[in-house]
Amino acid sequence: MEKPTQLTKSIGFYYVSKDNETKTSELSLLLAQKKAILIRAQWPSVPFLSVMDNVSLANKKGDDLESVLPYVQLPLSALKKERTELTPFEEIKIQLLLALLSERETLLIENVLSTLTTKEVQILLPLCQEIAEQFAVAIYLIHEDECFAHTPYTTYL
Amino acid sequence: MKTIHFAIASIFYHKKAMVLYTLVSFFAVIGLIVTFALIYSMDQVIAQTRDLLATEDLQTKVAEEIQPVTTIYHQLFYLIFSAFTLVFIGFQVYYQLYKRSEYTAWLASGATTRQWVAMQIIEMLLPLLAAAAIAFVLLLLFQPYFQRELLSGHIIALDRERASDNFWEAVQSLPGQEFAITIPQNSQILVQNVDLNSTTWLAILFESTRHTLVVLLAAVTGFTGLIASGHSLYWRKKQWKNQLS
């Protein structure tokens, strides 16, 4: 049995440099232990299911989707779209929604910012901070560009 | 219900593989129903031939001569079932390897391996049931042709074993042969003497179909469960180790 890490106890929105091997290996361990969920630039959805069905996979308790959607600033209409019609930003928001529905305590956001516009990044960072506070989860932003470590929304690790 | 819905979505997504699998299942179902029908109708041949005979000695002798033919039908069952099982295992292994990325996405969505395996089993059972339904309806529609072919099957098998010659000789060698004058001297006459009324015939058809379904459902459920869960556990262990790029 692998030992749990200290990272599991933190709540908040953190920046982790991609070069920080200690932290990234700890985060990898959390993923291996299924305590964390990974959010990628491209959402690895189940191809034969609709967007709504993919979301319902994570919604095991049958929570009311409409009550969770405002936290990720996603309209219900986005879930009714075809998979190919989703924008990269919507894909990230859906992954955030899946993470919240599956009640993971740790979320890792890896290399997603380069696929977003500046405006979308400006929306995503405060959104992640708010989600971390509202749902008492730890969100780790893993990115190579250290300028994101010094925003008012993230804590540098 | 959700799992059934997901399984149907997956079937439509993997149309080509599923059409192929349904075709293989269809032929396996037809083959097995015919084999079981041969076995059950042979019981009728034995029973009605016994009725022609006067003494118990003769009845036993006839049953002994016909018995090897039933063994041929059992061997035919093992042949068809083994062929289907081998093809199915090969298909299932290839299919699970092909679906690795889907399974990864499935786990990433927060769903469980148990649900995935259940979906795989349903995904295999639905085309099998569809193939069985089509096969059964076709056999019902073409009953006269099916019956004729069934009797031809018995004649070929009895000829192969020289059954009628053997028990004709047996009857001649036994005392009290004068009671056995109605014994047919060739397989064709012997089989054509057998009268299958509609109730018996339908009972044979339903029992054969039921037996076929039980055998195939058990095999498909067992092998799918084993291969899908084995592969899922292996892939999950390997996959979750190094996810960060």
Image: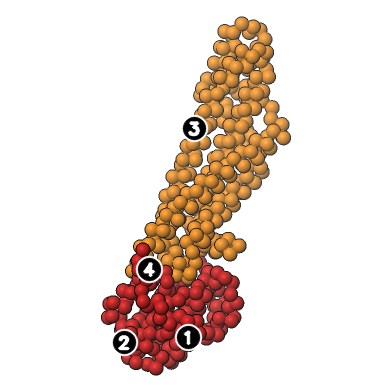
Chain colours: A red, B orange
Identify which amino acid the numbered label 1 is placed on: Glu
Secondary-structure class at tag 1:
helix
Identify which amino acid the numbered label 3 is placed on: Gln
Res. A143 visible in picture: no
Question: Could you say which disc has been placed on residue A32 in the image?
Answer: 4
Identify which amino acid the numbered label 2 is placed on: Asp
Q: Nearer the viewer, mark 3 or mark 2?
A: 2
Marks 3/2: CA–CA distance: 70 Å
Question: Could you say which disc has been placed on residue A145 in the image?
Answer: 2
Marks 3/1: CA–CA distance: 69 Å
Q: Residues within 10 Å of mark 4 (few under 14, many from 20)?
A: many
Q: Residue at x 43, y 61 (%)?
A: B99
Q: Quadrant of the C terminus of chain B?
A: bottom left
Secondary-structure class at tag 2:
loop
Question: How far from the left and from the top, in percent, is residue A106?
Answer: 42, 77
Res. B6 visible in picture: yes
4 or 1: tag closer to the N-terminus: 4
Q: Residue at x 47, y 82 (%)?
A: A136
Marks 4/1: CA–CA distance: 25 Å
Marks 4/3: CA–CA distance: 50 Å
4 or 2: tag closer to the N-terminus: 4
Residue B155, placed above or below residue A154 = above
Marks 2/1: CA–CA distance: 24 Å
Question: Could you say which disc has been placed on residue A133 in the image?
Answer: 1
Q: Residues within 10 Å of mark 1 (few under 14, many from 20)?
A: some
Identify which amino acid the numbered label 4 is placed on: Ala
2 or 1: tag closer to the N-terminus: 1
Q: Residues within 10 Å of mark 3 (few under 14, many from 20)?
A: few
